[in-house]
Image (spheres, helix red, strand yellow):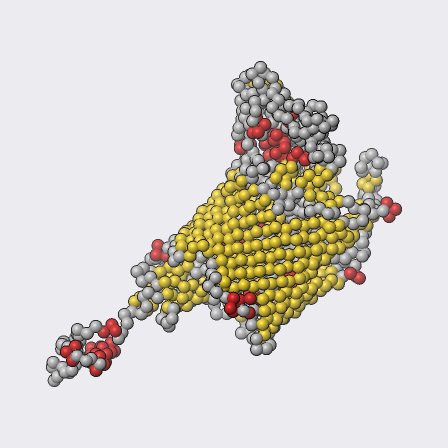
Amino acid sequence: MSWNKPNDVPNINYLKPMNLLKLVLCSSSILFMANAEAAPHYLWKTDKIESNLDYSFGLPQQTTVKGVLVDEQGAPVPNASILVKGTNEGSKSDDQGRFSFQTTKPKGVLVISHMSYATTEMPINTATQMRIVLKENSSTDIEEVVVTSFGIKRDRKTLGYGVAEVKADELSKSPTPDVTNALAGRLSGVQVSGSGGGFAGSNITIRGFSTFTGSNQPLYVVDGIPLDNSGGGNSVNSGVVNSSRISDINPQDIESMSVLKGAAATVLYGSRAASGVILITTKKAKKGIKNQISVGTNTGVGMVSRMPAFQNEYAQGSNGNYNNSVTGSWGPKIAGQEVTNWFGDKENLQAYPDNINDILQNSVSSVNDLSFTGSGEKYDYRVSYGYTVETGLLPSNKLTRNNISVNASTDLTDKFKVGTSFSYVNNVSNRTQAGNQGANPLWRGIYTPRSYDLTNMPFKDAEGNQLWFAPEDHPYWSIENIRNNNEVNRFYGNINLKYDFLDWLTADLKVGADVFSMVSKGFDNKGIRSNGNTSSAGAGGVQDRNVSMKNINSYFTVTANKKVFENWNLIATVGNEIIANNRNTLQSTGLGIVLPNFDNQSNFLTFNTSGNINQNRQVGVFADVVMDYKSYLSLNVKARNDFSSTLSKGNQSIFYPAAAVSLVLTDAFPSLKSNVLTMAKVRANVGEVGKGTEPYATNTYFGRASASDGFVSTLVSFPYNGLAGYTLNNSAGNNDLRPEFTREYELGLDLSLYNGRISFEGSVYERDTRNLIFAVPAPSSSGFTSMVTNAGSLSTKGIELMLNLVPVQKENFTWRSGFNFTKFKSIVEELAPGVSNISIGGFTSPNIRLVAGQEYGQIWSNAYQRDDQGRMIINANGLPKPTTSVQKVGNPNPKFNLGWTNDFNYKDFTLSFLVDFKYKGDVMSRTIGDLRIQGVAEETAEFERIDGSGNVTKPYIFEGVLENGSPNTTYVSAQQYYSLQGKYVAWEGYVLDGTFVKLREANISYKLPTKWLEGQNFIKGVNISVYGRNLLTYAPNFPHLDPEQNLLGISNARGLEFGFSPTPRTIGGSVRFSL
């Protein structure tokens, strides 16, 4: 090589690194060239070197890769690592989630990792700025760490029991103000049911029933501290369904809900854990994210999900004749004929099909939240505010809730960490009468004769007196004159101190409190109803009730996590828990209003007060030891010993043990792994948990005395004439009471196929509860009517299956589908000697009973008389004959439940829906029966009631036999068929099959592309969604109503429906901004 101008000094550009490199590469290439003529020829130029040699073989071309990382809400993800797979080329995302770097592999794959998100791989796209959505660590990942009792963290792969989990993104798909509703249809082993109506709570049952008369609700634990969930129940007399207290939680503050189902999973909670545990973890700032603001709002509009189908052909009256003073619609066919109405005015007959629609309104829910989050090297914080307003389907129903929450922590030193999470809740609501009350506006409203103008006819005179023909209160009068106001102020939270003595030894102290006050006032103006169950019916009444509760809880644990041998690892936790519960109730009731519309206690003829104080203490010590071999064989032994103040001294110490083992077959025997089988694990466990008694059940206590003459229930009540009087309670205390014990055995199998594209979890279990606590009759010689004792036994067997699929997984499109299956049967094995049954709710007849040898909670009532062949016995008038005694007529427990979830993700669009299927489960529906008895149901007009000659037709016949065994041949009219002497002569006639399929949820969401937000620094992400809840219900054997309605609300008694408490079908939209 030679210079063209050798005497000139080379241009300084020649010395630049890239030009020097070119010269070196050129020289090297010349040495290896066989053909000298192929050598490059340089031309001397003043500013650069040019060559006809292609240097790409020596220096790869570099391409710029740029993009942005966001989470599932569209918020930027800073401090994430982005690397090109197989190289060290890459960068970290900045505060806006953006990244940019050069790579020599433009067709390579990016690997994105962050401590708070699942590792993601994405093919490089250099044609445009990439937008990569990171998902939080998946709950289905077999390697993930899960939180169990008392915050103990375990590798899911080593668990010998199942833990089901619902993440925040699933809870937010179809927002609901009550978090418990979001679990419906999502998890195996978990049944969710409610009472219908506005703001009513939901009843959650985990793996069937574990007690006779105590609560079968699970224990709720929020950030390690138990939360009270009282309320939500309803008796046949109260007429108002209150929310369960767990609904005080703002759903937008929840990060995840984990369900501990088996005894081995819940044993560390001891005497509170027999019905399962739901662990709620609230949101906190993610590490690596500096400051972030999130603003969200969603609004939903609800309509009645299932409205009764009415006939509009026949008028008020009976036997085809018009009568303006009866409640039924068995009158003449409506043809515009002139009649005299109840007010004495002439009018032309016509139907009023919108009577009930005019009473109702669309419910509206508005849920708004604002949160501030941030973190640094040694701290993190999240502060949020939530505001919820919800109006019911009836105009007077309204709920307002304010939530303020804080979750923060700081590392004071490298070993010492302090954290806190707490919330304040203000919940104000008003509810109408519901259920079977004569003041329930919907009860009377749906039975109103089809020719009565309920909307436009006056319902009160100038003095406020009702103008109404029925024995119940006018619907509009009830809405105006009956109030049930409730206000709850609540604080719950904890302070957590954690110290790492060594890298394998940690101590954790958490002290928490759950404190609330509830002030409620019920006012019942003087009405006209004569058939209400409350003593205020037709007289007026007021009730003021104040409840204050203070629960203090603390626990201290020491955990060691250390490799003890070459292939063995030990995780051991020992700890103690101290619980102090205090609940005070003060109630004052006035009856017999003097001046209408004035709700002061002094405005009533009589009033009485009552109050009680409940206090109990409990101390527990526990241990949890795990030994695992090579992370595929794990043995977990745990135990707890409780000391309870509610039991007598000799029985206060209660011991609960458990053991679980798991074996990952594919790790123990690697040859089992294949392209099909990714992971297989078997697990087994046994555990024992229990349930204590209510305070003071061991004592016989005194109550206010009264005197009676045997005819009048109370002639004299104390205090009387300045003297106080007390008498022993009718129920005797039992100083030998012991806790209930539930022992459970479980076997499980977990599978992962095709690298997680298919995953399966299955469990079979059997549990037996003994020493159940309930009241039994006492000998008359004792002077008591009953005594609480330990007796009886209850068994449950069940199976749970979960199957998750990823049928389609492409670069821009993914379809995930999941099935969960639940089947269990709880059998009352035995009661107490001399006790044939226990009524757990309902009326004298019908009611829900526990009977030895039968499934839990059967429906009992009178029935149709039948002969030995099961044929119905018909009387001479062609109508069925009822029994005089009661018997089992229905089983409200479903045969099984099946949930089906689906998520379709296409680029920034997501479509998801949830289908919930319940097979069987009887419901005794008084509402459907009364719709037919009153002649307003659509099916009562399926045949012409009156023929061309004006005679009442008789198109119906009851299948059965006369008492002599000959077939019944007598036809009856529609009014006779659907009467209290016909189909509804026995309560058995009200029993229907409650099978249903529901489109429980549906959601369409869209995340705005980041490029749309470029050019400004304020909004970093936007997520828009449209959602629906209870969109469709198919119940082939249950017309008119939602089969999930339950008169008795959140209680052990199910299967009774009475009074039409409709569930809304909600459609709404939401938008969330990340700032």
Looking at the image, which is closer to me, 369 or 143? 143
The image shows residue 259 at horizontal and vertical percentages of: 59, 57
62 left or right of 840 in image: left
Query: Does the rendering let one see residue 183?
Result: no
The image shows residue 193 at horizontal and vertical percentages of: 60, 46
Extreme-right residue of the structure: 781
Residue at x-position 22% and y-position 79%: 29
Extreme-bottom residue of the structure: 7
The image shows residue 299 at horizontal and vertical percentages of: 48, 46
Image: 450 above or below 363: above
Residue at x-position 31% and y-position 59%: 128
Query: Does the rendering let one see residue 309?
Result: yes
Looking at the image, which is closer to me, 297 or 934? 934
Q: Determine which quarter of the picture holds residue 747.
A: bottom right
Quadrant location of the N terminus? bottom left
Quadrant location of the C terminus? bottom left
Residue at x-position 72% and y-position 60%: 617
Number of numbered callouts drawn = 0
Q: Determine which quarter of the picture holds residue 85.
A: bottom left
Looking at the image, which is closer to me, 185 or 720? 185
Extreme-top residue of the structure: 949
Residue at x-position 62% and y-position 48%: 203
The image shows residue 731 at horizontal and vertical percentages of: 80, 48
